[in-house]
Amino acid sequence: MRALHIITGLGVGGAEQQLRLLLRHLPVECDVVTLTNPGPVADGLRADGVRVVHLGMRGNRDLSAVGRLTRLIRDGRYDLVHTHLYRACVYGRIAARLAGVRAAVATEHSLGRAEIEGRPLTRGIRALYLSTERLGAATVAVSSTVAGRLRDWGVPAERIRLVPNGIDADRFRFDPDRRLAVRAALGIPEGAFVVGGVGRLVPGKRFDVAVRAVAALPDVWLLLAGDGPEAPALRALAARLGAADR
């Protein structure tokens, strides 16, 4: 069995990292197509031995991408097409149907109340999504929140499958020596209570809530692992709240 995974981009993000982790455990031969931005996760996938193709999509309305994607699917003789994220789901499901693939499924990694992939959620965007969703066999939601929003959009409940995100538990297994080493390197007292956050530092992640909460708790430290445009604002917020030193 051969499967093709189609994703909107392969920059650093949760959905992209989840795809890389998933491919390490699937018992089938898999290739990946990224519509745009073959970033660091593409390099990681190639290091894992996965074939990655950059489709070179020039924008949200680059309709020629459908033809290129259809030809790629036909040439690869894939048995399954699995799409990830909004734009890839829309274009990928259409291309899979045109290529005559027997089965197509989609995974929705994140749906906001009023936005999707950083763009405002309009009636047109939702209508386009729903019309192409019917071309697949099922849509996987990575959380109950995403499943609920899919139902609210109008996706029939019987077409939704809930499969929560997984992690590599061995990689994050508790190690007391590493704990002490990291605390020493970062200047965190050995016995301090530490709140951790991991992710892109962007407004939608609401790390400002974590900063405000920890600032209100004496002797509690906050450690954020990540980067992004909100980093200066978060540091400034911590300083205004008198908690910059922790």
Image (cartoon, rainbow, N blue to C red):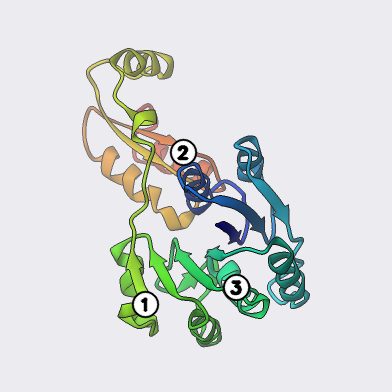
Nearest the viewer among 1 and 14 is 1
Q: Return the residue at label 2.
A: 235
* Above or below: residue 190 compared with residue 126: above
Q: Which SS class for mark 3?
A: loop
| Kind of residue sitting beneath label 3 | Val
Q: Which SS class for mark 2?
A: helix
Residue 101, label in figure: 3
| Kind of residue sitting beneath label 2 | Arg
Determine if residue 34 is in view: yes
Q: Position of residue 88 (x, y in %)?
A: 60, 67
Nearest the viewer among 244 and 26 is 26
Q: Return the residue at label 1.
A: 159
Mark closer to the observer (3, 1): 3
* Above or below: residue 154 compared with residue 211: below
Quadrant occupied by the N terminus: bottom right
Of callouts 2 and 1, the N-terminal one = 1
Tags 2 and 1 touching, CB below 8 Å: no
Q: CA distance from mark 3 to mark 2?
A: 50 Å
Q: Position of residue 22 (x, y in %)?
A: 47, 48
* Above or below: residue 178 compared with residue 33: above
Q: Residue at x 48, y 83 (%)?
A: 134
